[in-house]
Amino acid sequence: MKQLLTKQKAKEIGIRIAGTLAIPIVFAVVLLIACAAGGKTMISGVSGFSNFLIYAGIITITTFALSINLGSGRFDFSLGSMAVLSTLISVRITSSMPVASGTAIINLLLCIIIGAILGAASGGLYVLLKIPPIITSLGVTLIFEGITYSIASGKYINGGEAMAIYNFMNNNWWFALIIIAVALAVMIFVFDHTKFGRDYSALKEGQKVSVNTGIKEIPNAIVCYVICGALMGVVGFLSVARSGGLDGRSLSFGSIGIMFNAFLPMFIGGFIGRFSNDKLGYLLAGLSMSMLNSTFAAYINEISTSTQSIINAVLLVVFLIYLSNEQTCKDLVTGRLFKKWYIAIKTKSADRKARKGA
């Protein structure tokens, strides 16, 4: 009996490990073959590895932020504008400091604090106005974009502090690894091991029932917005670390594009999360998307930006189709679907013969 239980447990662990790693491994194998076929290198040198980690951090942490409010039915368009505005204010504050590695770390801390404040402001408006969050977030996005445009005078900002962040992160790739690890650890701790996290999960599963049991929805929602803002502050910092500049020209929802990059990894991460932790799933999805981005960079002369967007959109649609028809897809792969069709056709034929005989 013990041996049977041990075998069952080992099988369950094997399924969990396989389910967790399957998609990242498929991405890695397919993309490495694609690079090898064209004589390209997915990640070239220290700078390539640094860029890989930074982009993985951008996608992973944006996915964390997107999933928090979306999981509770609050669609927030203002995430991208928070990232840009928090980083711009931080860069302006530290512009009088000496350009050194220490100011890059100060910028990161400022981005987190300012992002949290912007998130609190967005959450406060949602609570005060009592209108659908999607409408509130659209208004907040326009406000934040307008402030960004005014501070930046409608220009693309590079050099100075932005370049200091870029140089520091590209010369210290391990710092991006630390940021990702800390963000993952904080997300797991806050949402899986605290009272706030348990209340959040309860509200997500059943809002009315949870409120009736004494869980306070409004404070929980505001904390969610604050966490999202802080996370997007980190995303803004990493975005500057990747490009060496900051776009202050975005108006009319131009900043929303930052958020849409996280949709595919959010769905992929949610699927992986069935076999492990959903936050770990988002990280593995972020790494997968970073591998794809590195492959695009390797084929920069062959694959245009528009084609890259189309490929990402096709992947998203295909994955959503799979999630909507998961059992059918599994049956198709294993051959069960054809067997079901054969049995159904055979049964109908037998019924017709029986009716004719009667």
Image (cartoon, rainbow, N blue to C red):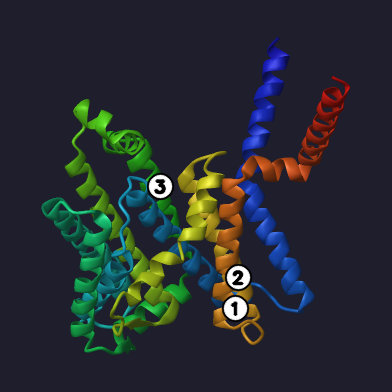
Q: Nearer the viewer, residue 13 or 103?
A: 13
State which quadrant residue 111 falls in: bottom left
Counting every numbered tag in the picture gives 3
Q: Amino acid at mark 1?
A: Thr
* Spatial separation of the CA atoms under disc 1 and disc 3: 35 Å
Do we see residue 181 in this rendering? yes
Q: Is residue 199 left or right of residue 288?
A: left
Instruction: Name the residue rendered at 20%, 49% in the picture.
Output: 222
Q: Amino acid at mark 3?
A: Ala
Q: Position of residue 95 (x, y in %)?
A: 22, 82
State which quadrant residue 148 falls in: bottom left
Element carrying mark 3: helix
Task: Name the residue tied to disc 1.
Answer: 307
Instruction: Name the residue rendered at 36%, 48% in the picture.
Output: 186
Q: Residues within 10 Å of mark 2 (few under 14, many from 20)?
A: few
Is 149 placed above or below 343 here? below
Q: Position of residue 113 (x, y in %)?
A: 22, 62
Q: Amino acid at mark 2?
A: Ile
* Spatial separation of the CA atoms under disc 2 and disc 1: 6 Å
Q: Position of residue 232 (x, y in %)?
A: 32, 63
Instruction: Name the residue rendered at 78%, 38% in the picture.
Output: 341
Q: Nearer the viewer, residue 266 or 142?
A: 142
* Spatial separation of the CA atoms under disc 3 and disc 2: 32 Å
Asked if the residue under mark 1 is in contact with the one under mark 2, i.e. CB atoms within 8 Å, the reply is yes
Nearer the observer, disc 1 or disc 3? 1
Q: Nearer the viewer, residue 296 or 139?
A: 139
Nearer the observer, disc 3 or disc 2? 2
Task: Name the residue tied to disc 2.
Answer: 311
Numbered circle sitting on residue 185 = 3
Which of the image's four quarters has the N terminus?
Answer: top right
